[in-house]
Image: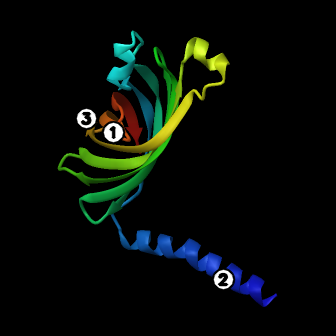
Amino acid sequence: MKNSVLLASAFAICITAPSTAFAQQDAAKAQVIIGGSAGYHDISDDGAAAGLDSGGFIFGGVAGVDVPVGEKLFIGAEANYHFGEGLIDSEYGIAARAGYRLEGGAKLFVRAGYQEVDFDLGAFENAGFDDTAGDYLLGAGADLPLGDGPLQLRFNVDTIAFDSVRGTAGLVLAF
């Protein structure tokens, strides 16, 4: 019984402590972002040398949250999912973000996380080859507000384990 009470008390403290910290930041509020993006994911030159596609266009969505840390800095987390064409069937991942908010609401950020890519290997798929690969993601980007509303233009450039380069642009709603 004592363990249950201690566990419940520790859980309550863990839940209420962050809300107390957020309450002390009177003007600072978390910002939720959701939207669509499109781009190109270049896998490598090896495929092009063998006569294969070396990447593919990707189309999908992103969702996340940014939390202010002070007046100009923020940290956040986001998830993405994209359908692909060419060598890419689909891809998905998660990333942590850290950045700087400029005057006017524009945000510059770096991010790190994990990205999984599902390849379209055609005839090789039935031969028992693994058609997925995942690794760490590193990138940078910018969210640029379009007027005074919630609509923002987003740009990202990422690499997955320095084996590929992925550039995306999109429109997100931030509220």
Q: Residue 58 falls in which quadrant of the image?
A: top left
Question: Under tag 3, what secondary structure?
Answer: loop
Whichever of labels 2 and 1 marks the residue nearer the N terminus, that label is: 2
Q: Where does residue 154 sit, x and y in percent of width and height?
A: 31, 34
Tell me the amino acid under the disc marked 3: Gly
Label 3, label 2: how far apart the Cα atoms are: 46 Å
Q: Is residue 115 visible?
A: no
State the CA–CA distance, disc 1 to disc 3.
Answer: 36 Å
Q: Residue furthest top?
A: 51
Q: Which residue is mark 1?
A: 162
Q: Is residue 22 above or below residue 123?
A: below
Vertical comparison of 3 with 126: above or below: below
Q: Residue furthest right?
A: 1
Q: Amino acid at mark 2?
A: Ser
Q: Quadrant of the N terminus?
A: bottom right
**Element carrying mark 1:** loop
Image quadrant in which the C terminus is located: top left
Q: Which mark is residue 9?
A: 2
Identified at 70% across, 86% down, the residue is: 6
Tag 3 residue: 147
Marks 1, 3: nearer the viewer:
1
- Label located before the other in sequence (3 or 2): 2
The residue sitting at the bottom extreme is 2
Mark 2, other Cα within 10 Å: few <14 / some 14–19 / many ≥20: few
- Mark linked to residue 111: none
Q: Is residue 164 visible?
A: yes
Which residue occupies 17% across, 50% down?
103
